[in-house]
Amino acid sequence: MSRQKDYLNEHLRLTRRFFLGGSAACLSWPSLRAESPELTAALAKLEPYFTVPADFRDVSRGKPLPHSLPEAKRREVGLTRDTWKLDVISDPDNPATLSKQFTRRDGTAFEFADLMRLAEKHAVRFPKVMTCLNIGCPLGTGIWEGVPLRHLIWLTNPSANLRRVYYHGFHNDDPKQLFRSSLPIGRVLEDPYDLPPVVLCYKLNGQWLDPKRGAPVRIVVPEAYGFKSVKWLIRMTLTNLFHANDTYADGNNDIDSPLKTFAATLLVPSVVKPLTPIPVTGYAQVGISGLSKVQVWIHPAGNPWPADDPYFTHAPWTDAEVLGPPKEWGGNLPGGKIPVDTMGFDPKTGQAKSWPLRLGKVHWAAVLPGLPAGEYTLRSRTLDEKKQAQPMPRPFRKSGHSALETVNISVKPAD
């Protein structure tokens, strides 16, 4: 084991030089591939930046799942574009002061055609990774298109006693399946910290939402986890209550926690030959705190670590290379191009204005040093824009995933 430690210490010095030691900038992919041919195959297998809508992971709720209903049933309950209706009402128990409401009961429900009229002037598009609060990997990344929710709110002519917006989706007319969420009215009416707006979303990657993604209309909250972006939207209640009513609150979750920054691996060989460089690729979710770098650390498995350093802050971490914007974005975008006027992209060139995109993801790569035979553990982590290392500053599971991933690698001669 001491030979392994000596070998690792020697090669960590080499890999630090290889990774240009401590650069916070996003480095270029070609330089890494040119110096490290072992990475060529691994980089070729990287997932596209944007996810094809049909390939998003699905964590929908409902029995049966609303998107699985036959088309005739979806039409009957208003889950197609030509049958969709949205109730927008004042809370009868804690009323907001409105001069107009939209209801099915009196034939004034807000319809898809009404939404499209708003879209003619107010449509926005922005990239966002969709992530479940309690799952350790994103569900998918896309360009979401919709109308800022505030334009609908203003149609009700609110004048007083409006503190929060409650909303929920179709739930098979079964109260036990009701899934709901909420937002403070301040977040709906204003976009703090240069965030995109909360939207009534109807398109993903330039295509109409499909039933699995929440068609015909869903909420998308840019900085939030997926439970805030309720699918199959059918009802919105404007209330004078000060507190949330989110379904996730009953599950002992932090319902106000924005997206975290964290790293994980994509391709890591489980078995390699001794003294052979080890190519590794991964992704980082770029949360509300941004991203300055990704780091990796490999060490002999089973080595004890001081109990007072549970997040390995004093480990000899090495900078990985954060890959720049891709040449091809993926996601089945129309014409393979970023839709015009997508937030965060230059309208003339179609290129990202800054990198990495906040509230999105980024890929990273590393070449680990060849190692003597033995068992090893690989970890990766992010440092945000304030140089706070994952899982800090919010290490608690109920506020979103950020645990350090552990990957085992066996180094042994070929059979």
Image (cartoon, helix red, strand yellow):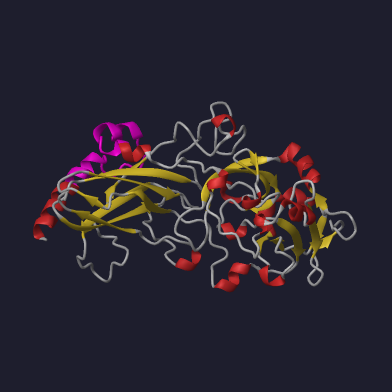
Outermost top residue: 348
The residue nearer to you, when weighing 160 against 366, is 366
Question: Is residue 70 in view from this perspective?
Answer: yes
Q: Is residue 14 magenta?
A: yes
* Residue at x 71%, y 71% (from the top left corner): 175
Horizontally, is 255 left or right of 29 in the view? Answer: right
* Residue at x 65%, y 56% (from the top left corner): 68
| Residue 337, position as x, y percentages in the image | 55, 31
| Residue 15, position as x, y percentages in the image | 21, 44
Horizontally, is 413 left or right of 186 in the view? Answer: left
The residue nearer to you, when weighing 180 against 343, is 180
User: Could you say which quadrant of the image residue 125 lies in?
Assistant: top right
* Residue at x 67%, y 61% (from the top left corner): 184
| Residue 217, position as x, y percentages in the image | 70, 50
Q: Quadrant of the N terminus?
A: bottom left
The residue nearer to you, when weighing 252 against 293, is 252
Question: Is residue 231 in view from this perspective?
Answer: no
Relative to 228, is 363 above or below? above
Which region of the structure is painted magenta? 13-40
| Residue 230, position as x, y percentages in the image | 65, 57
Horizontally, is 105 left or right of 250 in the view? Answer: right
Horizontally, is 76 left or right of 1 in the view? Answer: right
Q: Is residue 166 magenta?
A: no
Relative to 172, is 380 above or below? above
Relative to 21, is 188 above or below? below
User: Could you say which quadrant of the image residue 202 lies in?
Assistant: top right
